[in-house]
Amino acid sequence: MKCYKLPARISGLIFDMDGTLYTHEEYLKGQIDTIIAQFGKVRGKSFEEAREAVESYQSEWASAHGGRTISLGNTLAAFGITVEEGIRWREELIEPSLYLREDPRLRETLSTLSDSFALALVTNNPVLVARKTLACLGVEEFFPVSVGLDTCGVSKPHEAPFIKAAELLGLPPKACVSIGDRYDIDLALPLELGMGGILVDGVEDVHGLPEQLAATISLGLNKNP
């Protein structure tokens, strides 16, 4: 876990979902492969050809942008796949219940956090997939605010989903902390907006958040109203 510029007052926590609220490499890879396979299908390419095209573009983009990461959604947009089409693919093809189960420890962690902070979710999946994922994990009740690909019509990294999440929480960005497993996707822009950032290496780090944030508060760095 690594913290970046935690605000003087923290009132809201904005979580990424995939790779943050759960750690399941097979499911993460399965989501990507499913969408790439669909991309290949509509373009008359084999899966291997489609994957090579995607990875080649992402590699070239990273080289041209100082090693930063581009999301799969933004990659497909460069190939002419509309946001609407991407949303439909994800809603129809991604099924979290095939991989994920209720996580009692995550429920306990989020319950503790929700006693002190307002919680929101920002994901590059549509809200439908997000809500199904949260339901599978048994933590849907802790996220009254879910911002997905279909909420703002853009993929992270983009400021709009983070601004929308803060707005729905009724908080200014400077009172929020973005939490995710990818710096370029989940933290870089929120930090520019004045949010804090916490980089996690999967759900095990999420379990350490109550202690980390309690320590921050005890040091006087965070004074909630």
Image (spheres, helix red, strand yellow):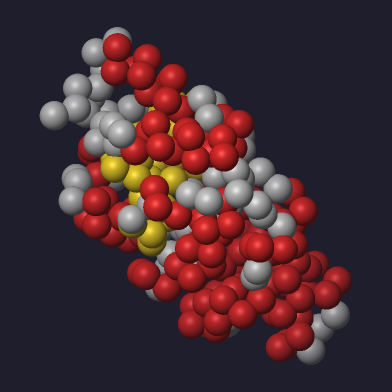
Would you place residue 43 above or below residue 102 in this image?
A: below
> Percent position (x, y) of residue 64?
59, 54
Would you place residue 207 above or below residue 126 in this image?
A: above
* Residue closest to the eye, 93 or 41: 93
Q: Is residue 116 left or right of residue 40?
A: left
- At a point 40% along the width and 37% down the height, the residue shown is 111
| Residue 59 seen by the camera | no
Q: Is residue 20 left or right of residue 142?
A: right
- At a point 29% along the width and 18% down the height, the residue shown is 217
- At a point 45% along the width and 67% down the height, the residue shown is 127
> Percent position (x, y) of residue 75?
60, 67
> Percent position (x, y) of residue 182?
56, 43
Q: Is residue 77 left or right of residue 53?
A: left
Would you place residue 39 above or below residue 169 in this image?
A: below
- Image quadrant in which you'd find residue 203: top right
> Percent position (x, y) of residue 93?
66, 76
* Residue closest to the eye, 15 or 112: 112
| Residue 209 seen by the camera | yes
| Picture quarter with the N terminus | top right
| Picture quarter with the C terminus | top left
Q: Is residue 182 left or right of residue 36?
A: left
* Residue closest to the eye, 61 or 86: 86
* Residue closest to the eye, 37 or 137: 137
